[in-house]
């Protein structure tokens, strides 16, 4: 059995998900999987949130975070 035979068997006989070779988005969507890039972004967001909430004690990391707040323009009457 070649290295491509088993994945083909899974795609067409078991999962019945058609996709062009080396294009896995339809398979990933059908199986509700995330791209590795998305997983990394979510992990980064979780670490940042935990740092800001104080759940992770890492002062050196916290001092490297640059936050910029947008000022709201309001009129006082």
Image (tube, helix red, strand yellow):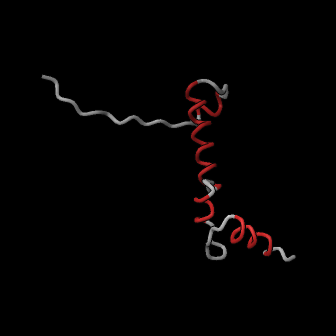
Task: Identify the image quadrant of the N terminus.
Answer: bottom right
Residue drawn at (65%, 27%), measured in percent from left and top? 56
* Closer to the camera in the image, 6 or 34: 6
The spot of residue 49 in percent (x, y) is 56, 33
Residue 7 lies in quadrant: bottom right
The spot of residue 12 in percent (x, y) is 69, 71
Task: Identify the image quadrant of the C terminus.
Answer: top left
Residue drawn at (74%, 73%), measured in percent from left and top? 8
Q: Is residue 49 left or right of residue 60?
A: left
The spot of residue 16 in percent (x, y) is 65, 68
The spot of residue 36 in percent (x, y) is 65, 55
Q: Is residue 29 left or right of residue 7?
A: left
* Closer to the camera in the image, 38 or 14: 14
* Closer to the camera in the image, 23 or 41: 23
Count of labels shown? 0
Q: Which residue appears farthest toward the right when viewing the image? A: 1
Q: Is residue 59 left or right of residue 73?
A: right
Q: Is residue 67 left or right of residue 35?
A: left
Residue 62 lies in quadrant: top right
Residue drawn at (59%, 52%), measured in percent from left and top? 38
Establish if 33 lies above or below 62: below
Establish if 56 lies above or below 13: above
Q: Which residue appears farthest toward the left when viewing the image? A: 77
Establish if 77 lies above or below 27: above
């Amino acid at each position: 059995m070649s290295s491509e035979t088993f994945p083909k068997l899974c795609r067409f006989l078991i999962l019945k998900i058609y996709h062009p070779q080396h294009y896995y988005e339809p398979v990933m969507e059908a199986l509700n999987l995330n791209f590795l890039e998305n997983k990394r972004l979510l992990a980064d967001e979780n670490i940042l949130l935990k740092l800001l909430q104080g759940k992770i004690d890492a002062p050196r990391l916290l001092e490297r975070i640059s936050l910029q707040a947008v000022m709201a323009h309001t009129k006082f009457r």
